[in-house]
Amino acid sequence: MKIKEALIPMKKTFAAAAAALLLLAGCSSTAKEDVDKVDETVDQGDAAAETKLEGEAAYGDTGQTARATVIKQGDKIADVIIETIDQDGNAITQLEDMADPTAQDTAIGTEYQDQVDYLENYIKENGVENIKTDENGRVADEEMLKNVDINVQPMLEAVQNALANEKND
């Protein structure tokens, strides 16, 4: 009988340990499911917060167009892509391809695409509304003029038109 009495507490301990293991197993699976749900929500939130906006503006009567794509993450501009398109739908990447001879003038000796890249980054960091131009469509800010001295007016209008499309949606 003494052996039987000694086994009873061991059975209770074993049963308690087994119950604890089951409880832990149940908690870990629930926690994993909760983490997955949070990850899905964050992923969906990031995707839902991204907005792609597009706008265009003409380079006078040359048949060339500035096209802008603005990617916004919430209220912040995440990326700006500006292209100049000729009358045949081809991208212009060199000043020599501009139809307007005055658009080909540049005093800083920087490649056309490098100037456009600088402008895109400037807009992303500072906003399009902070860029002032002169009567020739060139930037009026002396510091910025060291990096961009081409006619940017149609490019700025294309970006502004893209941003206006967000308000119209």
Image (cartoon, rainbow, N blue to C red):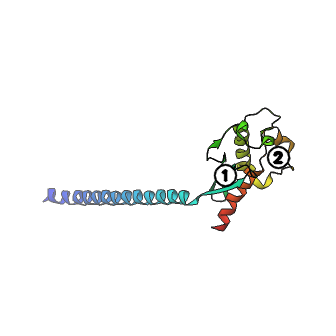
Which residue is nearer to you in this view: 47 or 122? Answer: 122
Q: Residue sitting at 71 percent across and 42 percent down?
A: 116
Q: Is residue 138 above or below residue 43?
A: above
Say which of 97 and 19 sits in front.
97
Picture coordinates of residue 57, whole percent (x, y): 71, 55
Q: Secondary structure at mark 2?
A: loop
Under tag 1, what secondary structure?
strand
132 displayed left or right of 24: right
Query: Residue 46 at x, y = what percent?
Result: 55, 57
| Location of residue 28 in the rendering, given as x and y in whole percent from the top left corner | 38, 56
What's under tag 2, amino acid-wise? Val
Instruction: Quadrant for the N terminus, please.
Output: bottom left
Cα distance, mark 2 to mark 1? 18 Å
Q: Vertically, is 29 above or below 99?
A: below
In the image, what residue occupies the spot 43% across and 60% down? 34
- Checking the image for residue 165, the label placed there is none
Q: What kind of residue is marked 1?
A: Ala
- Please identify the residue farthest to the bottom as the structure is shown: 168
Residue 160 shows in the view? yes
List the residue tagged with mark 2: 139
Q: Earlier in the sequence, mark 2 or mark 1?
A: 1
Q: Rate crowding at label 1 as few (under 14), some (14 to 19) or many (20 or more) other CA atoms within 10 Å.
A: many
The picture places residue 58, in percent across and down from the top left corner, at 72, 53
Q: Identify the mark at residue 68; answer none if there is no mark.
A: 1
Identified at 62% across, 46% down, the residue is 88
